[in-house]
Image: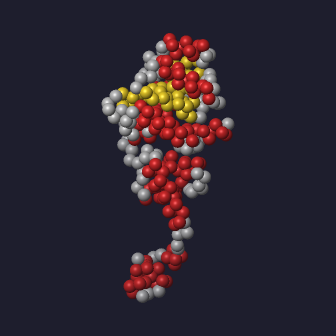
Amino acid sequence: MAKQAIEKHRISIRLACMCMGISETCFRYESKLSAENKQVADWLLRLTQANKRWGFGLCYLYLRNVKGFTWNHKRVYRIYRDLELNLRIKPRQRILRDKPDELSVPTAPNQVWSIDFMSDGLSDGRKLRTFNVLDDYNREGLAIDVDLSLPSARVIRSLERVIEWRGKPAAIRCDNGPEFISGQLVNWATKNRITLLFIQPGKPTQNAYIERFNRTARHEWLDLHQFESVEHAQYLATEWLWTYNNERPNSAIGGIPPKWLMKAA
């Protein structure tokens, strides 16, 4: 308004500032960070387009911890809001329940793994299942095995494949699914001196690490793709798992990717 008054009425800057109630310093101020703001906006747009389910927290942690930018979170959030990138989350009614015992936090890799199944479907209507393996120490996804059916023999084969390059876990936490309580898996675990930690029926919170991983996989991988075949689903699973382990910040371990925690250990 002060600039318009100067141009229209040909008055001095001092008089225009007095009329509008602003200081001359404010009138003459020019932002020095406009170029960096464009860089922040460009990064935010690229991240949200490549990772459609990432919110502000993951975007900021990725820029700060993975890429090494020193931008303040308030500044990044202001630009994030200006670009209207904030996700709308429908609030859910919470049911009061008894607080479960806290899960023990492993202090080293291969102390406890968590395993679980997820279900989805192919474009032709056939049911698809995934077998997920997670190291509770650094929340690293060790495997996502995809197929139409995953019996106990296939579960054992997947675990042995991971053990070949990762090493043997001291214990494996799982629910009471038929594939897990079968004699075949129990005998295999006993033979390899691996303790099976079964959660109580109907208590998925006792297997919270893998349940949280499943939610992320559902949100950022399964819900975003239509699978033409098992091979197509397996390829996308492997691609997403690499991103999850090497680039996606994980707030549970300090906002860094799971692989980074292994390097620091």
Identity of the residue drawn at 58% across and 18% down = 195
Q: Position of residue 168 (x, y in %)?
A: 62, 23
* Residue 177, above or below 40: above
Residue 75 falls left or right of residue 148: right
Identity of the residue drawn at 53% across and 69% down = 31
Q: Quadrant of residue 113?
A: top right
Q: Quadrant of residue 104?
A: top right
Q: Report the front residue among 26 and 148.
A: 148
* Residue 24, above or below 201: below
Q: Report the front residue among 83 and 134.
A: 134
Q: Position of residue 74 (x, y in %)?
A: 52, 56
Q: Residue furthest left?
A: 125
| Quadrant that contains the C terminus | top right
Q: Position of residue 145 (x, y in %)?
A: 48, 29
Q: Report the front residue among 173 and 129.
A: 129
Q: Position of residue 203 (x, y in %)?
A: 45, 23
Identity of the residue drawn at 48% across and 18% down = 152
Residue 247 falls left or right of residue 9: right
Mark yes or no: residue 216 visible: no
